[in-house]
Image: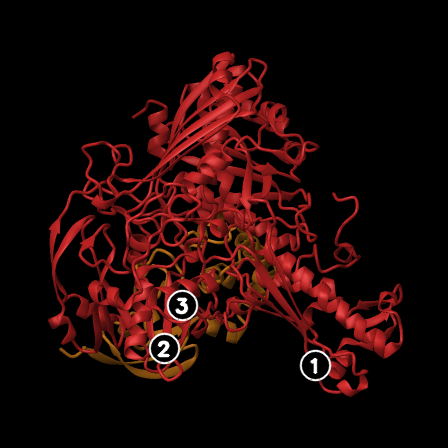
Chain colours: A orange, B red
Amino acid sequence: MSEATMEISLSVNGEQVARTVPVRQHLVDFLRTEMGLTGSHLGCEHGVCGACSVRVDGAVVRGCLMLAVQADGAEVVTVEGLTQTGEVADLQENFVNRNAMQCGYCTPGMLITASELLRDPKPVTRAEIRDHLSGNFCRCTGYHAIVDAVEMTLNKRLEEG
Amino acid sequence: MNKESPAPILDRPNSYVGRTLSRDAAKRAVAGRGRYTDDINPARTLHAAFVRSPYGHAKILSVDVEEAKQQPGVALVMTGAELAEMCTGPWVGTLTCFDGMKSAPQYPMAVDRACWQGEPLVMVVASSRAAAEDAAEFVMIEYEELPVVIDKETALDPDTPAIHPDLGDNLAFEKTIETGDVDKAVAEADIVIEDTFTFGRHTAVSLEPRALLAEYDPGTERLTIHTSSQCPHMVQAVFARTLGLPEHNVRIVAPDVGGSFGLKIHTFGDEIATIAASVKLARPVKFIADRLESFATDIHARENRVRGRIAVTKDGKITSMDIDIRSGAGAYSQYPRTSVFEANQILNITGGPYAHENYRASTQVVYLNKVPTSQYRAVGHPIGNSVGESLVDQAAAACGIDPMEFRRRNVMHDDSYPRIGAAGIEMRDMSHQQCLETLVERMNYDALREEQEEFRKKGVQRGIGIAAFIKGTAPGPSGYYGAGGAPIATQDACTVKLEPAGGVICMVGVTDQGQGVDTVMGQITAATLGVPIESVRVIEGDTDAVPYGGGTYASRATAIGGEATYQAALKLRAEILEIAGVLLQAAPETLDIVEGHVVDKGDTVSRISLAEIGRIGHFQVFELPNHVQPTLSATHRFRLRDALYIFTNGIQGAYVEVDIDTGFLKLLNHWVVEDCGRVINPQLADEQVRGGCVQGLGGALYEECVYDAAGQLQNATLADYLTPMAGEMPDIEVAHIQTHTGVSELGAKGVGESGTGAAPAVVMNAVNDALRPFGGKISSQPMSPETILKALGKV
């Protein structure tokens, strides 16, 4: 039995791409194996850990719960794209300076999830930051440093309007 | 603090040691440029998937792989029996240092009998993981189910079948130690408290699962393995020996490692199978565990029942402690590190902070038809500390003494070292008293007690927990691995080289999994040599490049690898000054190195740069007299001499709120004061403690691998095995007392496991403090809302 495939065409980090993909391939496998975008990670492949979080048409989604074929016609942004545009350069810098990661495996997903809080910044409490990040599993940091880094970035953006 | 530092060079103003610097690896991680094993894709890579036992215990009657071999993309199907033929023999997970220990021979994949659900039986190698999984569906295996042994309490009963009949029974190991006279102390005590504690089975849940990519080149007979490992040289030895390959032909590279926590100091059968496939097919073969495989095959830990007893005088002096441990291992003792360390560590450290002279501990480790157990972050300490610190709290309450004051009266005094601890192990350079008083200050303890009282009046139930601890770090060669016969180095090494352009290469046997080991070694090198940190590059995690070492385990990287790095850098520094002395016609002892330049001592004017010395030493050697032959490279190895461990100490505090109607728990505050000796990078040390605490809290509150009576793991997904997430965890305040260890000149002890070791104890004590007015008490972990309601008699 040969594997069922479909042609898809989508924007990945601003670049228009067309590929033939297995219909059962999920979005992150597509990004990692077809596009070489290894910044998105797989931790559980059932939508719990958040390591595979990517942005699809502006919304943060679990890349392991979406099939590549469902992204046909969509705009997909990964951590590589987010880095390229400089959209979260301040957050990334604070992550580094505050050591808001250890092994780094959860980091791309954390950044993409946290970027939602930063796009239209509003004052939030630490508890609200924790709540916002509570779908992203980090086994290393204990979260304190991540909350610090997000809070610092948010406050700076609020200050600067 | 030390009166006269044995390493004054590190204590200079603006030293890189003692300073927070960010990590290079962090800069890659935030850009999505981390490079983990699964990110590496050589041409023609094949992918392995496994057929695993669906039963807890079953005889394999037949295996039919013919149809699987015909499936699209399949390159190889290998059975357990076929793999066994490629191996030099089975593993036997015993160490000679554990007297009387026994374990059954184990092949990487089961040959004729599966002993736990998840044990690998058949490997399928195909063009993609999906194709391999598809084909695995066509492997036909006939089983005959066998009775399972699941309950550790009945595992030694005469009518319980032996999992491995050749062993006679299910006993892996037993041991008893006693110091002083416990029975006499108990008979003479004013108050004796007894309790029984139970601890659920945990697993590490590194976010990056186990991962291995094997590439065999039949021409040169060289095997290159990228794998997510903490201990490249150890896995080199195990892989090579198991498959009968020369160790020097096996190169292990640990690229970025996505979390490890002790899980990745181990070797697993599916990894051997993957390597064997690469050897057989002469192609790259990759195995990446999925999450289900991780739960069902990564080592488990922590399943213990401990009966404990404490004897005290009515004025609050501890006179004895004794414990009895029943430890539930898996179906085999994990090779080569064994499955008995956890019980042995509980025995070593329970009641460890205190000065009582009577102590007895006995343990029995039993085999069960479950995933093999072994070392997971803070091995044994979460259990030993929970038992000891709960008994201490209960004794304090029985005496009517505040638990902080009770500890103040009983901890070993800071001026009493070196001394022998209750378990008969030497302790030195510790600071229980100073840590305790610092915690009192940090918690604002008396005010917090008042606040708790105020809340109680309002019907809000808050609890304050305290847990003192000791932690065995950086084991020495006279202890378990060295004396036990395993191919695991307890010493470690560093090579430091001055390159022609003045750059410095530092190669270490210890490894980084995100702790910042490379950053710390760079800081030590730069501070010792007197060069800018930017000119130092640290290489780790590649057996072709670095000197032989044990890697990172048991909080040893900075304590052992750091001292090796410091000493290697001192040697290189001495050679640089000697060459500079010849070139400058000055006595080397009148010279110094500052910011990459040789200067006259006390001066900052450059007399010659290290780049110049590098150039002359490598290229224009004729500028030196014939008797001067530059090496510009120095290696140093370091090991502990007689010490079993470098023990560290500390104390944690917790403030929690318990909803007595729902059993829900809110973690309000958490404090840690710990003594890891010299702190190299304060931020990195803090973050080790914070992350460690949360890992401990996860185990205390949420995590448990649940088995049913048939030996089926019930919750092998991240949705069902609960881990701590950001929303439930508190901010954690960390302080360090720095009593340098006297066993090295650097003075650093381990720090990576101290949070994990005592966090379960402190949160259990805090919950029990909240429940005490209601007569409720918890002695089991994880402490779910249901456990709390049961303790309150509400369900």
Q: Is residue A55 left or right of residue B13?
A: left
Chain to which mark 1 belongs: B
How far across and down, in percent of the image, does residue B770 sit? 47, 26
Chain to which mark 2 belongs: B
Compute the Cα span from label 1 to label 3.
Answer: 47 Å
| Residue annotated with mark 2 | B216
Q: Secondary structure at mark 2?
A: strand
Image depth: mark 3 or mark 2 in front: 2
Amino acid, disc 3: Arg
Q: Secondary structure at mark 1?
A: loop
Name the residue at 88% across, 72% down: B605
Image depth: mark 2 or mark 1 in front: 2
How far across and down, in percent of the image, does residue B561 sit? 60, 58
| Residue annotated with mark 3 | A55
Amino acid, disc 2: Tyr
Compute the Cα span from label 3 to label 2.
Answer: 39 Å
